[in-house]
Amino acid sequence: QVQLVESGGGLVQPGESLRLSCATSERIFHNYNMGWFRQAPGKERDIVAAITWSGTETFYADTVKGRFTISRDNAKNTVNLQMNNLRPEDTAVYYCTAGGSMPTPGQYWGQGIQVTVSS
């Protein structure tokens, strides 16, 4: 059973920052590409960022380039999404994912975590 456990969501004001974390097993972490999707109310799920299993290649949606950074923590089998300068349109449920495809590794999904950006 694949487990992807997200943490770090919450409510922030526009311009503030959050860091999401996703903990998984060593098997998944070292053999799959990892990513973050998000789904706003009434909208489709879209890729936000992804990183290869080796950590040498990343992908970002145009809407988050320059604001979000995806990274891998090898010591903790964890993928992180640092989100800076958050905007109200970033409000969504964020999902940690793992899979074989880049830039959309969507084979395995976490439960999701809420991020709300509001003044």
Image (cartoon, rainbow, N blue to C red):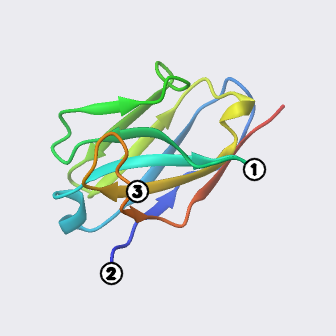
Residue at x 38% of width, y 47% of height? 35
Query: CB atoms at circles 3 and 2 under 8 Å apart?
Result: no
Residue at x 17% of width, y 34% of height? 56
**Where residue 90 sits: x, y (%)?**
66, 35
Q: Secondary structure at mark 2?
A: loop
Q: Amino acid at mark 2?
A: Gln
**Observer-nearest residue: 45 or 118?**
45
Q: Secondary structure at mark 1?
A: loop
Mark nearer the N terminus (2 vs 1) = 2
Q: Which residue is mark 1?
A: 41
Residue at x 84% of width, y 31% of height? 119
Residue at x 67% of width, y 23% of height? 15
Q: Relative to residue 30, is residue 3 drawn left or right? A: right
**Where residue 65 sits: x, y (%)?**
47, 22
- Disc 2 crowd, CA 10 A, few/some/many (<14, 14-19, 20+): few
Q: Secondary structure at mark 3?
A: strand
Residue 38 sits above or below residue 59 on the image = below
Residue 69 sits above or below residue 21 on the image = above
**Where residue 83 sits: x, y (%)?**
53, 33
Depth check, mark 2 against mark 1: the one in front is 1
Mark nearer the N terminus (1 vs 3) = 1
Q: Which residue is mark 2?
A: 1
- Disc 3 crowd, CA 10 A, few/some/many (<14, 14-19, 20+): many
Query: CB atoms at circles 2 and 1 under 8 Å apart?
Result: no
**Where residue 112 sits: x, y (%)?**
56, 60
Residue 67 sits above or below residue 70 on the image = above
Q: Amino acid at mark 1?
A: Pro
Q: Amino acid at mark 3?
A: Thr
Q: Which mark is residue 97?
A: 3
